[in-house]
Image (cartoon, rainbow, N blue to C red):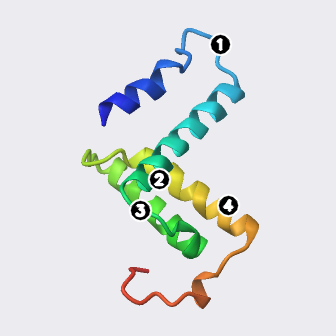
Amino acid sequence: MAGWIDDTLRNVPTFEEEMTYGDIADFARDVVMEVLLEGERTGKTGWDKMPPEFHARRGARHSELFIRGDAEEPHLRHAITRNVLALWLDTHGTVRDDEFAWGELDK
């Protein structure tokens, strides 16, 4: 896992260099793309069938685990990706939380 993280970070300006909002946006885009592609490679699809609230909750959980110091997975990377998915679905329309048949999924 460290390999792709190293590759993503290699092109990020250091604090000694002048960073722009574009640099930050590019970095965020690269991180989200890496997480999405990794999910696709491991068969984690169907994100677009879930309501935005589902992704927002999962993003919050990843943020909480990061804050608690859990290092089992790259929680900030997963949090930003889940929040981007939530934003996309909320902006472009999808099934809402109160309309979704949760079944086995946690609320």
- Which residue is label 3 attached to? 44
Q: Where residue 20 sits: x, y (%)? A: 69, 22
**Which quarter of the picture shows residue 44?**
bottom left
For mark 3, give the secondary structure. loop
Q: Give the mark, 3 or 2, whose residue is nearer the N terminus.
A: 3
**Which quarter of the picture shows residue 33?**
top right
For mark 4, give the secondary structure. helix
- Which residue is label 1 attached to? 18
Q: Give the mark, 4 or 2, whose residue is nearer the N terminus.
A: 2
- Which residue is label 2 attached to? 79
For mark 1, give the secondary structure. loop
Circles 1 and 3, Cβ within 8 Å, touching? The answer is no
- The amino acid on which the numbered mark 2 sits, given as a three-letter code, is Ala
Q: Is residue 21 above or below residue 52?
A: above
Q: Depth-wise, is mark 3 or mark 2 nearer the camera?
A: 3
| Residue furthest to the top | 16
Circles 3 and 2, Cβ within 8 Å, touching? The answer is no
> How far is the residue under mark 4 from the one under mark 2?
14 Å
- The amino acid on which the numbered mark 4 sits, given as a three-letter code, is Trp
- Which residue is label 4 attached to? 88
